[in-house]
Image: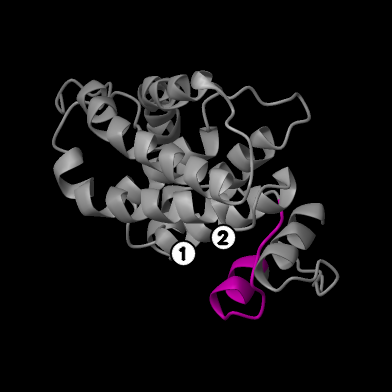
Amino acid sequence: ADFCRAVAAAVIGNAEKVTFVPLSASERFPALQARKIDLLARSTTWTLVREAIMGVQFAATLAAALLIEMLPVGRHPGSPDLLAVVLVFWIVHQPQRVGVGLGFLFGLLTDVHSGAVLGQHALAYSMLGYFAIMIHRRLLWFPVVEQALQILPLFVAAHAVSLLARLASGGMFPGWWLLVAPVAEALLWPLVSWLLLAPQRRPPDPDENRPL
């Protein structure tokens, strides 16, 4: 419920303009496909069938990354932005379904929660999404470690845009630890890629007649 209200606050500026529609398990996806509801906030299994055939975009991992960023543990300037890493991953692997618009939305949610200048993260994530789409075809030709090296400049640019927006609004410079954050995000790329691709991996076929 709180997540739905946060989306409403970021998109239409009013957290109370939310209508909750009770649906059974069999009604969830038809209602989402028919656009009777805008957001499905329910524990729902992510499967390849639903991803590919039903055409439903799952924001579960993005929402989880956002919730991790919202944990009240204090944020060090050198801490990696997990949401940015997950966002770039899905834009690279599913550019038809995850793009600049979703990056802008999650950026607004981050701004609303953190109390930052409205649009600071939205602008940074939008730019991150745009350049990730531009390089996604070429990026997938490389091993995951080389991918991390190639997306490092994207993370550096995103932090630079966010910093400029902060300084332009009268904010303070957070310190040189900020330079560590994009490096940490690039180092997280192999781990995030392995975790998010894990549901698509098939177990080895024990049939000796079908070695593939």
Instruction: Give the answer, above or below, for where 150 lies relative to 29.
Output: above
Does 50 sit left or right of 95 as displayed?
right
The residue at which mark 1 appears reads as 101
User: In which quadrant of the rendered view does residue 189 lie?
Assistant: top left
Viewer-closest of 209 and 85: 85
Instruction: Identify the residue shown where x is 52% and y is 18%.
Output: 177
Q: Position of residue 155 (x, y in %)?
A: 38, 36
Instruction: Identify the residue shown where x is 41% and y is 60%.
Output: 100
| Residue 57 visible in rendering | no
Check disc 2 and report its element: helix, strand or loop: helix
Crowd band around label 2 with a 10 angstrom C-alpha radius: few (<14), some (14–19), many (20+): some
In the rendered image, the quadrant that contains the N terminus is bottom right
Viewer-closest of 89 and 30: 89
Residue extending farthest right: 16
Q: Position of residue 171 (x, y in %)?
A: 64, 41
Hey, what amino acid is under mark 2? Leu
Q: Which mark is residue 105?
A: 2
Check disc 1 and report its element: helix, strand or loop: helix
